[in-house]
Image (cartoon, coloured by chain):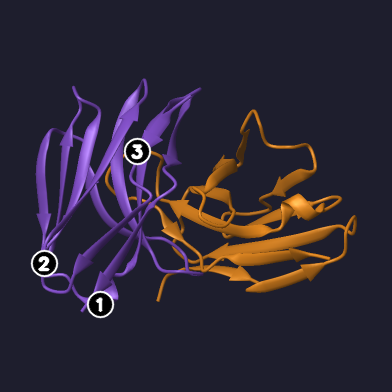
Amino acid sequence: DAMVIQNPRYQVTQFGKPVTLSCSQTLNHNVMYWYQQKSSQAPKLLFHYYDKDFNNEADTPDNFQSRRPNTSFCFLDIRSPGLGDAAMYLCATSRVDTGSSGYTFGSGTRLTVV
Amino acid sequence: GQNIDQPTEMTATEGAIVQINCTYQTSGFNGLFWYQQHAGEAPTFLSYNVLDGLEEKGRFSSFLSRSKGYSYLLLKELQMKDSASYLCAVRAASGGSYIPTFGRGTSLIVHP
């Protein structure tokens, strides 16, 4: 089945130690998104790619970076995780950025910072 | 920016009908989505509205009024498995692209 896959499902990292979260998709969608979701809060968009065009949200901290080496893969790099970065990180895709196709989410990576 | 407001929590009885409201303020509106999210899981797509009116899909219906900045999700014949968070998301123009912004979700508790 075509899907969005995030690895790992759970990630524990040390304070200040760089960590990378990965997302892959078999849907061949053009757009990929990274969201941060803290408990009982709305998913917050960090950045998105339309094909190779990178779009950073204005309030996304510099500590967060992203790479999309090809259509299928997208990575979220957190350069120096702080305790406040503990959250669920959701990857989503859409075929284009308009229309009724909606967004397909991966199962998320829950990040714990110790 | 966008402002999306939905109730924090609602409770309902199995078999009943519940309406979850969402109000929003935005410019460059390009569609409204409803997603269901069970605890610890990813959101899953429920419905999409871009024109005014009601969209029906089985037990779920969604309504949109663009002039009022208002939508609701209607769930009929509630089942215990419908206990989840329901997220309203508004897509709007941002720079050269269209971006979805999510509300914080309404936690629905269905009891017997």
Give the answer, above or below, for where B85 lies relative to A97: below
Give how far across and how far down residue B25 sits, in percent.
35, 25
Check contact, mark 2 vs mark 3: CB within 8 A. no
> What colour denotes chain A?
orange
How many C-alpha atoms fall within 10 Å of the one at disc 2: few (<14), some, or many (≥20)?
few
Picture quadrant where residue A27 is located: bottom left
Identify the residue at image location x=65%, y=58%.
A87
Q: Is residue B48 left or right of residue B36?
A: left
Q: What residue lies at 21% left-to-right and 64% top-to-bottom?
A: B12
Type of amino acid at the residue the image marks with label 3: Thr
Residue B90 is situated, as x and y percent measured from the top left of the image, at: 36, 37
Specify few, some or many for label 1: CA neighbours under 10 Å numbering under 14, 14-19, or 20 or more.
some
Residue carrying label 2: B16
Residue holding disc 3? A98
Question: The numbered mark 3 sits on a residue in which chain?
Answer: A
Q: Residue furthest right?
A: A16
Q: In which quarter of the image is residue A111?
A: bottom right
Question: Which residue in the structure is indicated by mark 1?
Answer: B80
The answer to whether marks 2 and 1 mark residues whose Cβ atoms lie closer than 8 Å is no
Q: Quadrant of the N terminus of chain A?
A: bottom left
Specify the quadrant that holds the C terminus of chain A. bottom right
Q: In this view, does A61 lie above or below A14?
A: above
Lower sequence index among marks 2 and 1: 2
* Chain letter of disc 1 in the image: B
User: Which chain is assigned purple?
Assistant: B
Given residues A56 and B89, the one toward you in this image is B89
SS at mark 2 in the image: loop
Task: Please indicate whether residue A61 sits to the left or right of residue B28 in the image.
Answer: right
Q: How crowded is mark 3: few (under 14 residues within 10 Å), some or many (20 or more)?
A: some
